[in-house]
Image: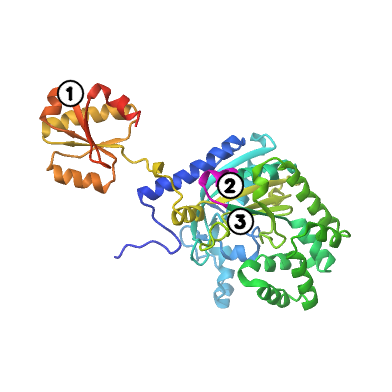
Amino acid sequence: MKPSIPKGTRDFLPEEVFRRNFIFETIRDVYLIYGFLPIETPAMENLQTLTGKYGDEGDNLLFKVLNNGDFLKNTPEETWQNRKSAEFIPFIAKRGLRYDLTVPFARFVVMHQNDLSFPFKRYQIQPVWRADRPQKGRYQEFWQCDADVIGSDSLLYEAEIIQMLYEVYHKLGIKVIIRINNRKILQGIAEICGIGERFMDMTIAIDKLDKTGRDGVSKELLERGISEEICNRILELVQSSDIEILKKNLVNSQSGSQGIQELETIMSYLEDHPAKNWVELDITLARGLNYYTGSIFEVVLDTTAYPEYSMGSLSGGGRYDDLTGVFGMQGVSGVGISFGADRIYDVMLHLSLFPDSVSQGPKLLFLSMDQLSHTYAFRIVTRLRSSKIHCDIYPEPAKIQKQMKYAHAIRVPFVAIIGEKEVSSQSITIKNMADGSQETVHENELIQYFNHI
């Protein structure tokens, strides 16, 4: 059998894992500074928890998990005759892999509400799965790094999220634009265009504007039964970047006016913060997920900094006013953000943004000439490890050329060469693999030596 992995998934070599951990730790450190607490949820959720939360397109991307045992035995004969796969699902699958971390978090909040203090600030760094077509920057298994505040409608938290976005990308060295909008503005546009009841049709279509262009959005809106005249007005309004023009057009829409006011309040919190210079109002930003009700965010690469490289959104999120309501806990507002670690990794790798110090492999490899020096080296390695110095030992005495070849292969920065002379003098010959220089260090000075390089 030829070994393989499913499309849209990846293996990671040690160096890649070190780099990914660098991203996770950078994000985690910022979350902790802002007072967020860690939680974890299962990879699988009940399908009824997941379905109906992401729109029709999202539901189609859910990975379903077949029931245990003979999962076909309770399927009605009528379902077999209709031969429609969607009709089989309620009978053969009751669980699914999580699509994101937000809906499981809402379920978590309701189940553990008596154990939490509100507002509750949580972060969660775990993988999610989507049955999407694999392509550049899009995987079927990928990691999300979420932070949410639930139990408050204060716009201060939107400002905190923007600050966190700025701090993470600033620390990672990636120049980005933080796109911001408000779903209430989009609701106002739908209302003044006379299609308030078609709001979801409108947002699903305009959310694809950067992929399909104006003509593609018009075509989809027309196919959804919206007239050409209204299509043109919608596109004219959502492509406007002038907040004053929007104010005038939405003056008779309570939702739209409230959305604009909320944006202005958020920006007032950021008045003295450098994040403000990274924020860009984008009315075309819709984020087609059903549960967003207020502010929405999306982070993209700054094309002026990287004109020859493109990537989809790196982060996204927004305000949801009643996500817990479907689980029986009404009227609890929340807001959150998610970092797409896999896309961030690809960007940093392509742009050579990982620092050289990211690798945490062995700092020192011991090479021995004979069994006596090998035993001596093992004793020194044990002592260094107890002092948390990353080191390793070649498993047996061998020709020095063979051991050095291994040292080069694992890219260890230093080797310790042990022979009869070193054993008798209780010293170690340290070779710098970068420049070939050597020096002798007494075994009692090794810990101090490696703590200072």
Span highlighted in magenta in the image: 167-175
Mark 3 and mark 2 in contact (Cβ < 8 Å)? Answer: no
152 relative position to 253: left or right:
left
Discs 1/2, front: 1
Task: Name the residue type under label 1.
Answer: Gln
296 or 79: nearer the eye? 296
Question: Badge 1 is on which residue?
Answer: 426
| Magenta stretch holds residue 170 | yes
Q: Quadrant of the N terminus?
A: bottom left
Name the residue at 76% across, 69% down.
236
| Image quadrant in which you'd find residue 391 | top left
Discs 2/3, front: 2
Mark 2 and mark 1 in contact (Cβ < 8 Å)? Answer: no
Task: Name the residue type under label 2.
Answer: Asp
Q: Which labelled disc corresponds to residue 146?
A: 2
Comes first in the chain, label 1 or label 3? 3
Report the coloring of the rendering: rainbow
Discs 1/3, front: 1
Mark 3 and mark 1 in contact (Cβ < 8 Å)? Answer: no
Question: Badge 3 is on which residue?
Answer: 50
Local secondary structure at mark 3: helix
